[in-house]
Amino acid sequence: MEPVIGRFAPTPSGALHVGNAFAFLLAWLGAKSQGGRIILRMEDLDPHRSSPAMAAQAMDDLAWLGLTWDEGGQGATPDPRYVQSQRTQIYQQYFDRLAAQGLVYPCFCSRSDLKAASAPHLSDGQLRYPGTCARLTPEQQAQRREVRSPAWRVRVAERSYTIEDGVQGRYTEYLPTQCGDFILRRSDGVFAYQLAVVVDDTLMGVNQVVRARDLLPSAPRQRYLMDLLGFPAPQYYHVPTLLDQDGKRLAKRERSIRIHDLRACTTPQALLGKLAFLAGLQSAPVPQTLPALLERFSWSRVPRQDIRVPEGLFTLSECSPD
Ligand code: GLU
């Protein structure tokens, strides 16, 4: 069997929170329980939202938790070969390959055009692109280019893509109705997550993708791009998203869930124990070590549904006031 290569792929646009740590813990256990390796990749594609300081802090928080990685940088300094903002020339090559297949076209729609033209996607709240710019003639494209620089979309195939997810089971999307032609490159030149993640996972040898369940709808799109580019598909494990008391995704601005803030008033073992409890790996939120969790880890114990974090599980109240 080929060795497992998993990854941590934080977006350094905000501080790491317990929801991220939950997914990274499971990614680490998933790879290490099979003697695998972990790659750390900084997903800082959007230059306006990400910062090197946040990347450094994410690395420091992961190291504090004991969630080590084997490639991707040392200390708090990412290796530029694993930093998405440094990899645009690589994404361009694969974008060009898709374009050479005649599958890429410019899209001049503004955000408000898109909102007006499409019904919200049912499963993930995203908009389905109705194909407005898919059939523009070269003359129409040239005219529009004079007033607006385009985004670039890939034409989706008229077929379903199915993911056999290690936690969620079988997940299928029929791309034309469930997502429509999707963006590969934004109008400001930034490559889209869907393209970057597929290229990076493949070139970095990643064969086990563990991430939060809110990204499940991206998996069929990514499988589609992998098919087009002739890439092998990884094994996916979409783990529950952690929710707040109102059933909403945990927000990074909430201090009591940021690893950096929790570090002042808890131990890595206490935090790992709470995350392991939520992951179904132990029956009470008691402190736990990584070697002990490795011994009891099994994907079959991880719940499928999103998890509402019990009130007061993560709290700063034991901290002395600063
Ligand atoms: N960078 C993404 C995030 O922080 C994760 C993407 C992925 O795991 O594919 O949500």
Image: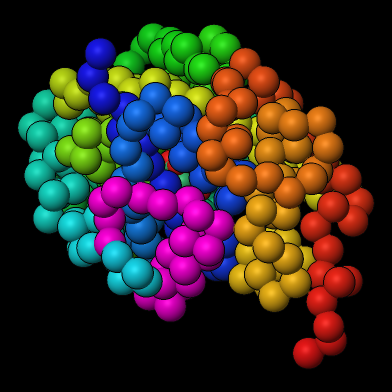
Which residue, as the protein is rendered here, is positioned at the far bottom?
322
Q: Give left or right: position of 217 versus 73.
A: right
Residue depicted at 83% across the width and 83% down the height = 320
Residue depicted at 47% across the width and 61% down the height = 63
On the image, which quarter does residue 6 sit in? top left
Q: Position of residue 180 (x, y in %)?
A: 44, 28
Main SS category, magenta section: helix
Residue depicted at 33% across the width and 32% down the height = 36
**54 is higher (above) or lower (below) than 224:** below
Q: Which residues are magenta?
A: 52-73
Q: Give left or right: position of 121 versus 245.
A: left
Residue 315 appears in view: yes
Residue depicted at 57% across the width and 61% down the height = 16
Q: Give left or right: position of 14 versus 71.
A: right
Queried whether the magenta region covers residue 62, the answer comes back as yes
Comparing 200 with 121, the one in front is 200
**31 is higher (above) or lower (below) than 149:** above
Queried whether the magenta region covers residue 281, the answer comes back as no
Residue 116 appears in view: no
